[in-house]
Amino acid sequence: MLQSRHWGLAALALALTAIPLQAATANVTVDYSQPKQTLAGFGGSITWTANDLSNFSAADQTAILDDLYNTSMPSAGLSIIRAGSMLCQFEPSAGTYNFNDPLIQSEMNWMNRVKSTYGVNQFMVTTWTPPAFMKSNGSCSNGGSVLTQYYPDLANTMVLWMQDAKAQLGQEVNIWSTQNEPSTSTSYDSASYTPAQFISFVTGYLKPAMVNAGLTSKLMLPEPAVYGGASYFDSNWGDPLLSNAQMDADLDILATHGYGSTSNLADPSQSAIQYNKPIWMTEISTTSGSYSGTITEALNWADSIYGALNTGNFRAWLWWWCMNYNNDNEGLIQYNNTTFTYQVPKRLYVIGNFSRFMRPGSIVLTTSTSNSNLEPTAVQPTSGSVAVVLTNKSKQNITTTVTFKGISTLPSSLTPYRTSSTENQAVLSPVPVSGGTVTITIPAQSVVTLVG
């Protein structure tokens, strides 16, 4: 009896192994008749770490900047540079100004070099803290609020900084963000603002001072550490800020950071919709765990971009540090600040599968997918007709058929650029377009961008 049962199970196992596994498939639709938001671009911050670029060899400096900005090769393809105003260094004591501080000048040198070499000229500047003497705690760090009697002085200091930057960059900074993470007190540069304090300072002092100086930089707020979805962001920031008519008139861009659950970025801000404000995701990374440059880690950020662009209505997506020397995952370039050697994690190339081909001015298109493991993100690009990113999060290959709707003329073929555990935006053979569709297999845990 036992022997008979044993042979019965063996026969069943043989029968099961003889049944071929069904290949995973996905049907994706890209609808040009349903355009959504216009992208401002993708970026990363150079705050504090720009000062280390000059410590690398000339060849490594070029290679690092190529990895970050050169769109003619595998790269992050960034189009926005985020810098810090370093106001504590700029005005170390009342009425004493030093735009030549090394932390400021290293950022200016970086921005000028990238502008002249790669044509990247979108500059966003965030203040981490006002000058210490203006704050309630008298310190650059550990939070503290701006004393109201210093509101006019702070507005004047910010205007002077913008004027100095304009003279050195040959253009105004595009965006001025008044305060980084205004509800977070840290042991490094930080300060606190409530929505009411933002309204009082920006509408009463900063915006009038900029207008008087002839400055036209766009104003951005509030850059909290956590987005938390629409319910959190809108109730804590969006609605209190924008329900004030003057702030609604003065504020150009809403912004948040993406710490916490990245899936929250797929939940669109209703304040942004109600008041017709573009919203940017201006900082995201992870500090948990030691350095990991794997494709598995990188796919988390493809998923973040997918949610932010497709349903979150975000117009820009910025990583935290362009360069990072901590043994964690905060940087697109991981470097050693003793030996000045570096390595490039997979997340740089995965992010570049989006940013290298979705340039500023591209229009996000409505997409759908029949397979939740296959995430499509598509734009009407600024050059050509097609830029579609297909992210396969699963451990199984997915044969994908993409159907293009609402477009009269398509190229005869599309070029795939694939990032996987062994490839970095590798250029593959063109795939034919027939009858408004294209079929391609997306390998397990890979990202493929179709361009044409």
Image: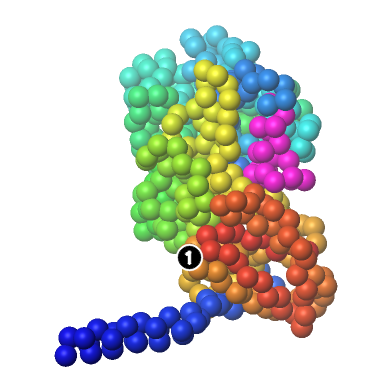
Instruction: Please give the name of the residue rendered at 64% of the width and 77% of the height, measured from the top-left corner.
Output: 401
- Viewer-side residue, 247 vs 362: 362
**Which quarter of the picture shows residue 342?**
top right
Q: Horizontally, is 276 left or right of 258 in the view?
A: right
Which image quadrant: the C terminus? bottom right
User: Which residue is depicted at the point 67% across and 52% down?
Assistant: 425
Rendered image quadrant of residue 44: top right
- In this picture, is 416 found above or below 359? below
Label 1 sits on a secondary structure element that is: loop
Residue nearest the observer in this picture, 280 or 47: 47
Query: What is the residue that sits farthest to the left in this orientation?
Result: 1
Q: What number of labels is visible?
A: 1
Q: Is residue 141 left or right of residue 2?
A: right
Where does the image place residue 406, in percent across and percent down from the top left?
72, 78
Q: Is residue 223 left or right of residue 49?
A: left
- Location of mark 1 (residue): 394
Q: Is residue 258 left or right of residue 11?
A: right
Residue at 42% over, 15% down: 133
Residue at the spot 23% in from the left edge and 90% down from the top edge: 4
The residue lying toward the viewer, choosing from 31 and 57, is 57
Looking at the image, is 61 positioned above or below residue 290?
A: above
**Dot 1, how many residues are within 10 Å of its Cα: few (below 14), some (14-19), or many (20+)?**
some
Query: Could you tell me residue 99's position as x and y percent?
Result: 62, 15
Residue 57 percent coordinates (x, y): 68, 20
> In the displayed structure, would residue 298 be above or below residue 177?
below
* Residue 223 forms part of the magenta stretch: no
**Is residue 224 at all visible to an observer of this figure?**
no
Closer to the camera in the image, 25 or 375 = 25
Please state which amino acid type lies under the numbered disc 1: Ser
Q: What segment carries the magenta color?
A: 61-79
